[in-house]
Image (cartoon, rainbow, N blue to C red):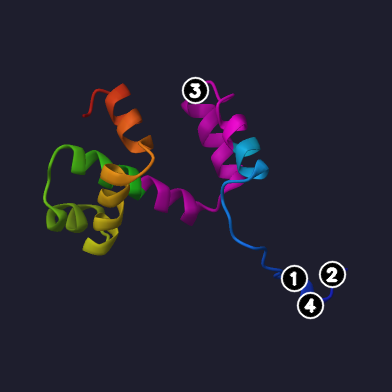
């Protein structure tokens, strides 16, 4: 049994590491939406999946040039959340834009 004071050991945060590379490589092996659904449900809590889904909905609406207020109201998030997604959409690593273009949404 793990002693209580060691249950929530925090690691130094840096998301670009071998563990995340392994995760992203695993994601590339998913062949369809059903496999993605099953993998992400095992990997994430329902709340984490919901949060990612909301961010994706925000990105799609931003690509359609909807207003921040309209997006916030319809997706049920704050305008600051919309602004954060917009920042990553326009100044991130290009991931949102890549997928939006592949899906012909941008």
Q: State the SS at label 3.
A: loop
The answer to whether 61 appears left or right of 49 in the picture is: left
Picture quadrant of residue 6: bottom right
Q: CA distance from mark 2 to mark 4?
A: 6 Å
Task: Verify CB contact (< 8 Å) between mark 4 and mark 1.
Answer: yes
Task: Verify CB contact (< 8 Å) between mark 2 and mark 4.
Answer: yes
Task: Verify CB contact (< 8 Å) between mark 2 and mark 1.
Answer: yes
Q: Main secondary structure of the magenta part?
A: helix
Q: CA distance from mark 4 to mark 3?
A: 41 Å
* Residue linked to disc 1: 7
Q: Which mark is residue 2?
A: 2
* Residue linked to disc 4: 4
Q: CA distance from mark 4 to mark 1?
A: 5 Å
Q: CA distance from mark 3 to mark 2?
A: 38 Å
Q: Which mark is residue 32?
A: 3
Q: Which range of residues does the magenta coloring cover?
A: 24-53
Foreground mark, 3 or 2, reads: 2
Task: Verify CB contact (< 8 Å) between mark 1 and mark 3.
Answer: no
Quadrant location, the C terminus: top left
């Amino acid at each position: 049994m793990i002693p209580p004071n060691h249950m929530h050991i925090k690691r130094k945060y840096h998301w670009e590491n071998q563990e995340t590379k392994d995760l992203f490589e695993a994601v590339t092996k998913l062949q369809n939406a059903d496999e993605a659904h099953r993998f992400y449900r095992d990997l994430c809590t329902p709340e984490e999946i919901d949060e990612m889904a909301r961010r994706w909905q925000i990105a799609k609406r931003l690509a359609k040039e909807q207003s921040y207020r309209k997006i916030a109201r319809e997706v049920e998030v704050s305008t600051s959340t919309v602004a954060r997604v917009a920042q990553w959409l326009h100044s991130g690593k290009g991931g949102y834009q890549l997928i939006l273009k592949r899906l012909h949404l941008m």
